[in-house]
Image (spheres, rainbow, N blue to C red):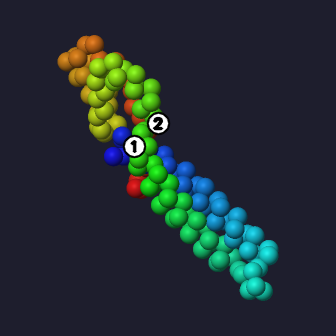
Amino acid sequence: MLQSSDVVHSLERGVALGGATGALLGLVALVYPPAELAIAGGAVVALTLVGAGFGAWTATMIGVDEPNARLERFRGAIRDGQLLIMADVPGSREHEIEQMVAQHFPKADLEGAEPTTPIFP
């Protein structure tokens, strides 16, 4: 699911946009407190975290149904009947695995490595 959908990219955007929105709302509430309430820096931090959490949740719900944008360049070849093989291998063995694939499948077009998946989801 992490590789075929756009959930990771959506999660990153959701955390960033939700956190920024929460921080902005917290700062506005700090400057213009609602109903004469005394708002301190803790409220800004809390709103930032709540915004980041809500943004992560909603963006992930959307991203799980979207196709992975990084795979868009391969969709035409897949429609033409070619195969896409993705392998998760340790970075230290990447060169060795590429040599093995090239040896056993000489027609394979090796596209290289993608960035590692983030620690969270």
User: Height in image: 75 above or below 88?
Assistant: above
Which quadrant does the C terminus fall into?
bottom left
Q: Amino acid at mark 1?
A: Ser
Residue 73 place in picture, x, y as percent: 45, 26
Tell me if I can see residue 99 in this picture.
no
Q: Amino acid at mark 2?
A: Ala
Q: Residues within 10 Å of mark 2 (few under 14, many from 20)?
A: few
Measure how far apart labels 2 and 1 are at the Cα level. 8 Å
Tally of numbered discs = 2
Q: What secondary structure is marked by label 2?
A: helix
Residue 102 place in picture, x, y as percent: 26, 18
Tell me if I can see residue 79 in this picture.
yes
Q: State the residue position of label 1.
A: 5
Foreground pick, 77 / 13: 77
Residue at 44% x, 55% y: name it: 61
Residue at 23% x, 23% y: name it: 100
Q: Earlier in the sequence, mark 2 or mark 1?
A: 1
Judge left or right: residue 114 versus residue 92. right
Q: What secondary structure is marked by label 1?
A: loop
Q: State the residue position of label 2.
A: 69
Judge left or right: residue 59 versus residue 106. right
